[in-house]
């Protein structure tokens, strides 16, 4: 606010005026707070009206700064919204900004983009892409169109966004290494046990190339896919990832990712925890050759006769009273490992085998199988209703099931399919049983099971990327843009997981995202906004991250202070 001296009818006239910048037009506007009167008339009560009212304005500004004086806004009830105006803006992203700057990403992007001498600001574009990937995942075009939902500098074009994708992929490995070091130094990182898994993402495109290949889709889709191998630390924070052609076998993805981490990430001995898709002789030899260990699930139904007999033998189990039992043994076994000439060399590994049974897993296995069994029985009754594609999941429970090689239709002219009861009985024998093989023979069976159960974190991470972050389906076609898309998803996942960890892992990422999205406000008048959401999560963000999301009314200046605070170097990290 300031004192304005203007002319009215040729006479000096004094007013107290508030100046502000219109958020839509970006032009400075003025609003009269108080009309004081003509200067010559005011001299009758004040010897020096200008000096007097300047002091009044000064006091008003000080009071407003201290929030001691209520703000009065003049609202025009007939005012309409200009077309395309982004009247509602999000402030919840300040929590994400806190983690983003804790990871020193602004400095990283500034330093690494400098050699490109681009006209756009890489950091500003990356903030939009990363924050939106968490809060409002959409295509790059849609994200750009909704960029005004944040209180950020968005002085860049859609073409700049695509140019940025091409730029950031050139320092993909450097960015992952930077994130690892920042997580280690700032948040603390434990790599005693690391969890590895593979998933794939499909493309809404039929054409294949060297990356987009048709393979074994986790979602049983016919579309081309890309494989992602992801490595996470003991606390479930991503360490590194890589992409592989869609037809790459899961077991072939681990060595490149782990070799990179062991060489560049300055980690000591690690224990790799993974499912049976990674349990191969070559991978086991790879761990042991580097002094590392492993905890891997072992197939039972597809295993040897000896392992099946060991699992079903009731001797040695303990803790059977509560629907859970466990046993273990030290068991040296011989594995055949590929050598440089492509031949197999046999050598012995000393392992511990852990087998456990859970009544809950038993019930889950039967529940998971039920739809396939129902389909199989329906198919027996009405084979014409099914074909090779639609009989997926049920086919293994049927005998005499023959498909026409051209049409995929079921052929019943010579013999009709019938249900394989023996197959079902054999499968049911092992319901509820899990087997684990590990190099960590000195740990107890219970410790090994607890380590293996940590694998759910990486399964949850993939669920988050596919659902909450909507990394699939992928509509991009250029390889550099595809690589950049998954790099953005990786950064977003790291930030989301660190935010959840900072809040003591009390809330799921989905719940955090829902809360932060609701922490939005609408512009009232001038530069004032009204916010309409608070909950347990926003209170936790306010107290833990020192980001105040509690106030109902905020000026643009207040909002900038909050966002400025989100860029500070420290907060109360639990």
Image (cartoon, helix red, strand yellow):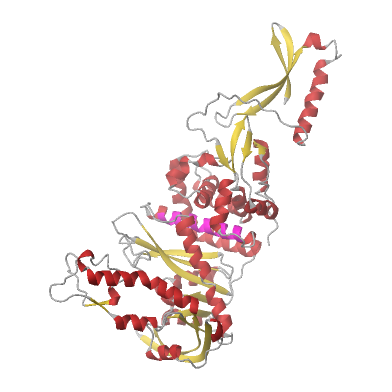
Whether residue 490 appears in magenta in the rendering, the answer is yes
Q: Residue furthest front?
A: 381
Which residue corresponds to the image point at 65% horizontal and 61% vertical from the top-left? 186
Front-most of residues 450 and 472: 450
Give yes or no for residue 412 being in the magenta stretch.
no
Count up the numbered dots.
0
Residue at 50 percent across and 61 percent down: it is: 173
Q: Does 196 sit left or right of 444 as displayed?
A: left
Name above or below for residue 563 compared with residue 443. above
Q: Which of 572/564 is in front?
A: 572
Highlighted magenta segment, given as a residue range: 482-500
Question: Residue 95: x, y in percent?
Answer: 62, 51
Asked whether the viewer can see residue 476, the reply is: yes
- Asked which quadrant contains residue 276, the reply is bottom left
Res. 152 visible in picture:
no
Residue 557 image point, x, y percent: 67, 37
């Amino acid at each position: 606010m300031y004192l304005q001296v203007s002319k009215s009818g040729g006479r000096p006239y004094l007013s107290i005026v508030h100046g502000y910048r219109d958020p839509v037009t970006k032009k400075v506007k003025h609003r009269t707070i108080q009309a004081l009167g003509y200067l010559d008339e005011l001299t009758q009560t004040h010897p020096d009206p200008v000096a007097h009212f300047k002091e009044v304005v000064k006091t008003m500004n000080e009071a407003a700064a201290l929030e001691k004086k209520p703000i009065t806004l003049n609202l025009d009830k007939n005012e309409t919204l200009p077309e395309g105006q982004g009247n509602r803006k999000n402030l919840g992203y300040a929590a994400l900004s806190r983690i983003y700057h804790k990871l020193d990403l602004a400095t990283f992007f500034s330093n690494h983009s400098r050699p490109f001498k681009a006209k756009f600001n890489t950091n500003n574009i990356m903030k939009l892409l990363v924050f939106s990937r968490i809060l409002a995942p959409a295509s790059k075009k849609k994200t750009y169109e909704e960029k005004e939902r944040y209180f950020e500098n968005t002085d860049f074009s859609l073409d700049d966004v695509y140019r940025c994708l091409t730029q950031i992929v050139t320092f993909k490995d450097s960015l992952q290494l930077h994130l690892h070091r920042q997580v280690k130094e700032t948040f603390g990182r434990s790599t005693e046990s690391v969890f590895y898994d593979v998933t794939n993402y499909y493309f809404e495109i039929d054409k294949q190339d060297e990356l987009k290949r048709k393979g074994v889709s986790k979602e049983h889709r016919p579309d081309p896919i890309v494989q992602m191998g992801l490595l996470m630390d003991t606390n479930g924070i991503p360490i590194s990832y890589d992409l592989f052609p869609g037809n790459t076998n899961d077991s072939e993805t681990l060595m490149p990712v782990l070799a990179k981490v062991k060489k560049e990430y300055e980690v000591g001995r690690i224990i790799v925890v993974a499912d049976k898709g990674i349990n191969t002789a070559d991978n086991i030899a790879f761990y042991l050759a580097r002094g590392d260990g492993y905890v891997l699930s072992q197939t039972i139904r597809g295993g040897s006769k000896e392992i099946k007999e060991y699992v079903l033998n009731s001797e040695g189990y303990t803790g059977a009273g509560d629907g859970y039992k466990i046993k273990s043994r030290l068991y040296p076994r011989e594995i055949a490992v590929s050598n440089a000439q492509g031949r197999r060399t046999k050598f012995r590994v000393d392992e511990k085998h852990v087998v456990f049974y859970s009544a809950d897993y038993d019930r889950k296995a039967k529940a998971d199988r039920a739809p396939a069994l129902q389909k199989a029985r329906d198919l027996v009754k009405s084979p014409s209703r099914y074909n090779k594609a639609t009989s997926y999941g049920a086919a293994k429970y049927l005998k005499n099931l023959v498909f026409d090689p051209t049409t995929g239709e079921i052929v019943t002219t010579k013999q009709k399919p019938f249900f394989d009861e023996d197959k079902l009985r054999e499968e049911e024998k092992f319901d509820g049983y899990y087997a684990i093989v590990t190099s960590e023979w000195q740990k107890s069976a219970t410790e090994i099971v607890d380590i293996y159960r940590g694998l759910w974190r990486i399964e949850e991470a993939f669920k988050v990327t596919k659902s909450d972050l909507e990394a699939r389906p992928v509509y991009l076609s250029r390889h550099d843009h595809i690589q950049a898309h998954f790099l953005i998803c990786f950064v977003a996942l790291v930030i989301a997981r660190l935010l959840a960890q900072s809040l003591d892992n009390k809330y799921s990422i989905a719940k955090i995202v829902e809360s932060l999205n609701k922490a939005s406000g609408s512009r009232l008048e001038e530069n004032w906004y009204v916010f309409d959401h608070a909950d347990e999560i926003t209170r936790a963000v306010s107290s833990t991250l020192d980001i105040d999301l509690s106030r109902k009314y905020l000026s643009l200046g207040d909002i900038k202070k909050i966002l400025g605070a989100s860029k500070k170097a420290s907060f109360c990290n639990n």
